[in-house]
Image (tube, rainbow, N blue to C red):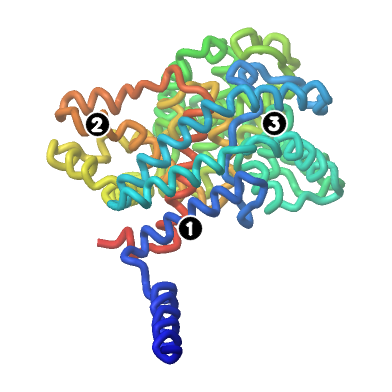
Amino acid sequence: MMNNNSSSSSTSRDDDRNKETSPSPSTLDSRFNQTLRNVQGLLKGRSFPGKILMTRRSEPLDQSVLHSPNTHRVPSESDIDHIDQVDRSNEDELQNRSNASASSSVNQMKSSTTGSESTSKEIHKSTMGARATDSARLMKFTKELSGPTVILEKLRALSWSGVPPYLRPTVWRLLLGYAPCSSDRREGVLRRKRLEYLDRVAQYYDIPDTDRTDEEINMLRQIAVDCPRTVPDITFFQQAEIQKSLERILYTWAIRHPASGYVQGINDLATPFLIVFLSEYLEGSVETWSMADLSTEKILNVEADCYWCLSKLLDGMQDHYTFAQPGIQRLVFKLKELVRRIDEPVSRHIEEQGLEFLQFAFRWFNCLLIREIPFGLVSRLWDTYLAEGDALPDFLVYIFASFLLTWSDKIRKLEFQEMVMFLQHLPTEKWTYLELEMVLSQAYMWHTVFNNSPSHLAG
């Protein structure tokens, strides 16, 4: 009898070991569950090297860069208390939306009801205390920036989930490699680069048309036409002086980059830099800003910083703006493949209706979603963009897939013409940081799943 029991127990242990060592029915399921567990740990304060999952923003929408505080202000105790109060008051809403989003994604990627229920529970637990570390993050930013040398990877990790507005100008210069990490060298380098920009403006912009080629004259005219059309819903950009600054930046950049020259859409990419660097000198809402309040020296400093940061950004995506824009076409193809893997019903419906991804996603990649979301959210989105560094172009695919599939249920009900109109005028006008952060969180999870398993995106 004892032998039989022993044999039975041994067999049971063997079966358990076989269950543990045998491959799961779906590698994708396993990776997705692991990603969710990682996200749970991340929200509790742990981190992945070089990246932090985006969390709920400290400031409500009306305290964004559109109401930028003085860049030299340091966080006070009342700031931190306010942040904690906002976090607690919004925790329930964040939990509910996070649960819904995660459950929807899991249901699309998994057929098991039990699995999706388990995932929903994990997400629910992961949101608990998600904002508890925000005060600590503010202190980490201050500590990192106050040292003699900034450790760029640490700064990227902090910045991925949002940069305090009053620190954003300094952080963006560092993330883009425009300002050096050494605090001793920083002021001298910025002074030299700003003078170099002035030299380029004098050489290329402040000259008579008789000294320009016909191609350069046409390019300058096109820029002059596009500047008044840039961010038309923000009245600040209708001021003549800001349009002249934008014109100088774009034309000088285009002359210095003849492989691409000026391409419509690059004007949009300069606007986040203008707003962020102007926030060092102007306070309150952007709608109340006036360029007349700034000295010529300050305006030119802002222009120079915008010029160099725009150059750094576009250096990593040059083929997005060369002839036929092959870089964008390549990323649109990757987006199509990723959506097919994540949400096959939506992918099939888009294909059956005869809609090409290039018809709606080209503008997304060309303008980096600036025209698709409220302008007040753009700087927050760009915190993540710039934190990604050289990996940004590939990560855009995941952000845009998450953005598109926000309306998965709606899209499946639309026919071709309705779908075209819907995707060209997406209902984001009432979006807050919460919706944006859900998009980025989902993008992060999918990137972790698929980027480590490129075969999932193959054929």
Indicate which disc, 2 or 1, sits on the residue closer to the N terminus.
1
Indicate which disc, 1 or 3, sits on the residue closer to the N terminus.
1
- The part of the image, by quadrant, that contains residue 310 is top right
Indicate which disc, 2 or 3, sits on the residue closer to the N terminus.
3
Query: Disc number at residue 34?
Result: 1
Marks 2/1 in contact by CB < 8 Å: the verdict is: no
Q: 408 or 391: nearer the eye?
A: 408
Identify residue for label 2: 411
Identify residue for label 3: 164
Local secondary structure at mark 1: helix
Q: Residue at x 21, y 43 (%)?
A: 345
Q: Residue at x 41, y 22 (%)?
A: 428
Q: Looking at the image, how many numbered discs can be counted on the residues?
A: 3
Q: Residues within 10 Å of mark 2 (few under 14, many from 20)?
A: many
Q: Nearer the viewer, mark 1 or mark 3?
A: 1
Query: Disc number at residue 292?
Result: none
Task: Name the amino acid type tagged 3.
Answer: Pro
Q: Where residue 240 appears, x then y in whole percent? A: 56, 11
Viewed as shown, does residue 424 lie left or right of 72? left
